[in-house]
Image: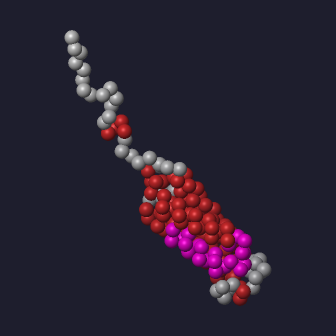
């Protein structure tokens, strides 16, 4: 006698078994790292701003030696505002929302330009910050959407 079996496989091949959610890649952790770098960068910018506000003689370069000739109190306010905005954008980037990533990229780009204009006062740190800004922009623009699914 022949044994008639069901033509269905023993394994469940329905959508629920395979799942339709996209798999996160290793870049998800890099995006989280980039968000924390944004927050750290924001704190450092705020400290630089406070240093320029509290003690204008802290930097060895005269404010006329910078790319934009404004006094250190104005630079202090610029750094402080960008630092606070970067910190808040880093917190928002952890949510993975598109608007938070857009705001983050805008403020990170603004931070890179400000750092470039201020590079005479802190050249070593300026190069490090611009490099970090480029990496953060890359992580947020290319792989930022993976964080929302994480």
Residue at x 76%, y 82% (from the top left corner)? 61
On the question of residue 40 being in view, the answer is: yes
From this view, report whether residue 141 is shown above or below residue 121: above
Decide whether the magenta segment is chiefly helix, strand or loop: helix
Left or right: where 143 falls relative to 15:
right
- Residue 111: x and y in percent read 59, 73
- Residue 69: x and y in percent read 66, 88
Residue at x 37%, y 41% (from the top left corner)? 19
Name the outermost residue toward the top. 1
- Residue 76: x and y in percent read 66, 77
Q: Which residues are magenta?
A: 105-126
Residue at x 67%, y 71% (from the top left corner)? 127
- Give the image quarter of residue 116: bottom right
- Give the image quarter of residue 36: bottom right
Left or right: where 121 falls relative to 33:
right
> Does the magenta-highlighted stretch encompass residue 115?
yes
> Does the magenta-highlighted stretch encompass residue 144?
no
On the question of residue 88 being in view, the answer is: no
């Amino acid at each position: 006698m022949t044994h008639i079996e069901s033509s269905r496989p023993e394994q469940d091949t329905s959508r629920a078994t395979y799942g339709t959610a996209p798999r996160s890649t290793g870049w998800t952790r890099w995006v989280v790292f980039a968000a924390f770098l944004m927050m750290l960068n924001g704190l450092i910018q705020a400290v630089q701003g406070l240093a320029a506000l509290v003690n204008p003689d802290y930097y060895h370069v005269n404010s006329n030696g910078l790319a934009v000739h404004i006094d250190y109190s104005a630079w202090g306010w610029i750094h402080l505002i960008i630092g606070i905005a970067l910190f808040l954008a880093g917190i928002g980037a952890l949510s993975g929302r598109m608007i938070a990533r857009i705001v983050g990229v805008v403020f990170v780009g603004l931070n890179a330009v400000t750092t470039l204009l201020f590079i005479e006062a802190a050249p070593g740190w300026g190069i490090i910050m611009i490099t970090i800004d480029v990496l953060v922009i890359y992580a947020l623009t290319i792989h930022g959407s993976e964080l929302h699914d994480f």
